[in-house]
Structures are given as structure tokens and as C-alpha cells.
Image (cartoon, helix red, strand yellow):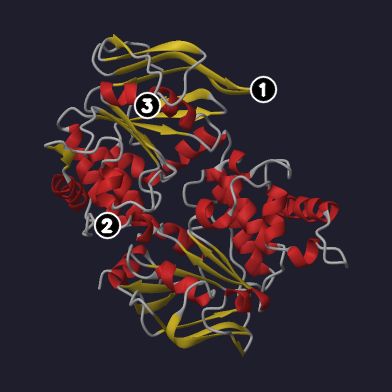
Amino acid sequence: MTTTSERAGLSVRGVSKRFGATQALHSIDLDVRPGEVVALLGENGAGKSTLSNIIAGVLASDTGQMTWNGQPHTPTAPRDALDAGIALIHQEMRLLPELSVSENVFVGRQLMKGGRLDRKEMDRRAKEALERLGLDISPRRTVGTLRVAAQQQVEIAKALTLNARLLILDEPTAALGAEETDHLFEQVDALRAQGVSFIYVSHRLEEIARICDRVVVLRDGQWVASHETAQVPVRQLVENMVGRSIDNVFPDLTPPTDHLALQVEELTSTDGSFKDISLTVNRGEIVGIAGIVGAGRTELVRAIAGADPVASGTVSVEGKTLKPGDIRSAIDAGLVLIPEDRKAEGVVLDMSIADNVALANLDSVCSSGGFISPGRVSEVAQEACRTMTVKGRVEQAARTLSGGNQQKVVIAKWLERKPRIVILDEPTRGIDVGARAAIYDVIVGLAAQGIAVIVVSSELDEVLGLSHRVVVLARGTMRGVLDRSEATDVAVMHLAAA
């Protein structure tokens, strides 16, 4: 790795960080030059977020030093880094749901005029930043009413209004579809032409060649590889990250049965997000749902699972029609949903792994007298975690787990109910290659056991790699159903953009 210090730009030398018994970073060096986009790659737990937080002033390093544009960079708080022109856009969104879009964009740095809040100018600048990202919404809209993808764009809009000279983007496209990602990349290209630098953290390795100049790979808190160009085969990057060869990303599928498990007939939402959707899923079949952001994918699967009300239409499991908008009816029938936002809807972060598993399985952890049995809670949780290979003790808080292991806990707690139908909405969002491979194995394994599976993903290769059939949505309507043999990226996008 290069050790040449650049007077202009960021220079990190010998930075280390320990948390208790865990050495999170081991003497890391990093250079980022003006107008350069450097990819920082690694599995969850590799040290990417720790290094990013040290540069951005969220954490202090134990050893090492940093310079920024030739001057010592020793931030003791995020404000110090922001004042120096360095901003971090976190992977986990830190928006205030009760405030408006513009209030979130300018939180902590509100614009004033004549001693009063200048809402008009805040709205104008926020809307301008959002439009640069391809998002046309009112800046007065409450953030809590937005879907995850739109919230992510609000986070990015905050960065665009900071006028920073170094932006650290941590999984910026995790919630975005292809069109939204293209808008972001256009803005990155425009800013880098103005000399703005980027540290780009992503698990979407196919993006690296498009947007980055160089690549740095961490593993277990240590530097393991650097590439002076981003034109590196994805396979090589994966092997750098995991330290071993990955032969097949997606497991082989087994043929589905002819037994109908789920039937959706002319389902229509109450808010206009989808209309007259009909589809079927057989036992042992994986049906992927594809479409660009705003197609109605998440709204549809939430309605199927009873999490949201419907205006009309029916959902049937094994021939039995479910009560509309009744999630308990769906769960009792054996239909479960793994939601897209695991932190907000999948796990209770401050509860233990065991308690999270127990929440979905109270009927299994209660004694005959109706009281919760701590021993049974631990037993059920340990078995669920063993099945999903969750790395962690069942008594530790879910907050302390990596994103991949949190997702495994969400899946584990619902699989413990022995469901007939499993719906997974963005099952690998924001998690590393190794964890993805494990979740892919689980999904294909469920189908092999005769369970019907629906997978929603913004990553088209994921939908194509996992599905027997692909349902394509566009603007809330079904545009087609493709068999595996005819489901290509071109065929899907042709329907999705129609």
C-alpha cells in the first residue's frame, strides 16, 4: 500500500482502535486525494465503519495520526470534522421521523433571516438537493411518512447541502434502485470534478468499477489489499474480503411442486400504491418480485402478509382465505414476512437475541400456566440461532450484532414458527458478501423443504439468481411474469420501465 503522504487531501497513518477485548483496527494507513473516490471494502466487522467514524470525529483513535489538507486532523466531535469540511453519511439513517424533510436536511444548522427561522430558503435548498437525486417530493412532508428508499435520499441530500470537501458515504445505495443510484452517481461525478473527495463504502461490488478510482480492502480490522484501479473483477474483490475463494454466489434451485401454497387475487391497496395484483406461489417455489423504487413491491408484500389494509382482493393460503389486513390471521395460517427495515421493524435493538426470538414465539416459550419460561426462551433461541448460524450469545443485545447477524436473527425468529410461506423484503440490504451467501443458502434451503418463498430485492441479480419465476411491477401494476429461462436483466427492465 502506498505510503506517500499527500499535502492536499486526507492522510491516515497507523490508526488503531480497540473496544474491550476486540481489536477493531490494526495500524491502518489510508490516503484520499482531492477529486478522488476511494472504495473502502470489507465484510461486516472488517473495521470500515470504525475507520469512517474516526475520520469523521465520532470516535477517537487509540494510536496514529491524520492530516487533512496538510494540517493535523484531530476531531474530538463530528462538528469539528464538519467545520473542517469532512462529513459522514451513516449507513443507519439518523433522521427525525416527526420533522419535515427540510428540517431534517438542515437539522442542527437551521437557516436564519432577521433572527427568525428561514423556512422558505430551507425548503428551496432541500428541494433543489432532492431534485438533483431524482426525488420529487414536498420539502414540508414529514420524513416518517416516507419509504426507506426516499429516506435514504433525504440523508444524501443532507450531504449535498453541507458543501463538504470530503464525503464519507456508508452504503449510500443500499435502499436505492437503479434509477436513484444513477442520479446519485451523477452528483458524485459532478462534485469530484470540483475537487470533492469521497470514501465510498458499499457491499454492491458491481458499483465499484463505475464510481471509484481506487480500492482498499479491510479484513478483521487489518489492511489486506489495495488496487490502484477500480477495474478489478468482482470475484477478486470478494476473495480479498473473505479470504477464500467463492465459487458460486447463488445455490442451485430444486424444482418446485405443483401444489398451490399462496394465491393472491386482484389485490388493490387503499393508498393507490398497487392495483389488481394477482399471483400464485407453489410449495417449494421461489417467486421474485422486481421493479424500480416506487413500483409498489414493499406495499404489496406487506398487504399480502396482513401488515397493511387493502381496498379489495383476497389472499389465500392452502385454499383458505385470510382476513384482510389482519397480520395475526396470516401468521396463524403459516405466512410470515421478513421486513425491509430490520432495525425499525425486524428486531428490538435493546432487547437480547433470545427475547427477540421469543417475541415471535410466545406460544413456544410459555409454561402450561401461561408464564414465560426463561429456560425455554434460551433453549428456543439457541436452536433458532444454531439453524441460522448467528454469531453471538443469545443473551447479548441485538444492537451489538453486525447487520448480517441482525438479519439472521429476524429470519431465525420467524423460521422457528415452521411457516408454510416466507416473504423476504430486501433480505440482504446492507450486509456483506459472506452473510449474503449464508442467507441465499437459507432461502434456497427453505424452498427445498417445500416452503413457498417470495423475495423482493432492489438488486436485480439477486432476484434473477434466486427465483424460479419473476413478477415485474411498474407503478403499482403487474407488467409480466417471467420464467427463470426467460428472466434476464434486459427482459425485466424492459417490463419495469414500461
Q: Secondary structure at mark 2?
A: helix
Between disc 1 and disc 2, the foreground one is: 1
- Residue 445 x/y as whole percent: 65, 62
Q: Residue furthest right?
A: 368
Q: Is residue 65 above or below residue 477?
A: above
Kindly identify the residue that appears in the image at 51 percent across and 35 percent down: 241
Dot 3: within a 10 Å radius of its alpha carbon, few (fewer than 14), some, or many (20 or more) residues?
some
Q: Amino acid at mark 1?
A: Ala
Report, in whole angstroms, how far the alpha carbon at label 2 lies from the one at label 3.
Answer: 31 Å
Q: Amino acid at mark 2?
A: Glu
Q: Secondary structure at mark 1?
A: loop
* Front-lying residue, 110 or 189: 110
Q: Say which quarter of the image contains residue 377.
A: bottom right
Report, in whole angstroms, how far the alpha carbon at label 3 lies from the one at label 1.
Answer: 26 Å
Identify residue for label 3.
78
Position of the N terminus, as image quadrant, is top left
Identify residue for label 1.
21
Between disc 2 and disc 3, the foreground one is: 3
Residue 465 is left or right of residue 119, and the answer is: right
Sequence order check: which comes first, mark 2 or mark 3?
Answer: 3
- Residue 130 x/y as whole percent: 22, 51
Residue 176: numbered disc = none
Residue 443 is left or right of residue 193, and the answer is: right
Identify residue for label 2.
179
Sequence order check: which comes first, mark 1 or mark 2?
Answer: 1
Kindly identify the residue that appears in the image at 26 percent across and 25 percent down: 85
Q: Amino acid at mark 3?
A: Pro
Q: Is residue 195 above or below residue 249?
A: above
* Dot 2 and dot 3 residues touching (CB under 8 Å): no
Report, in whole angstroms, how far the alpha carbon at label 1 lies from the one at label 2.
Answer: 43 Å
- Residue 274 x/y as whole percent: 36, 77
Q: Secondary structure at mark 3?
A: helix
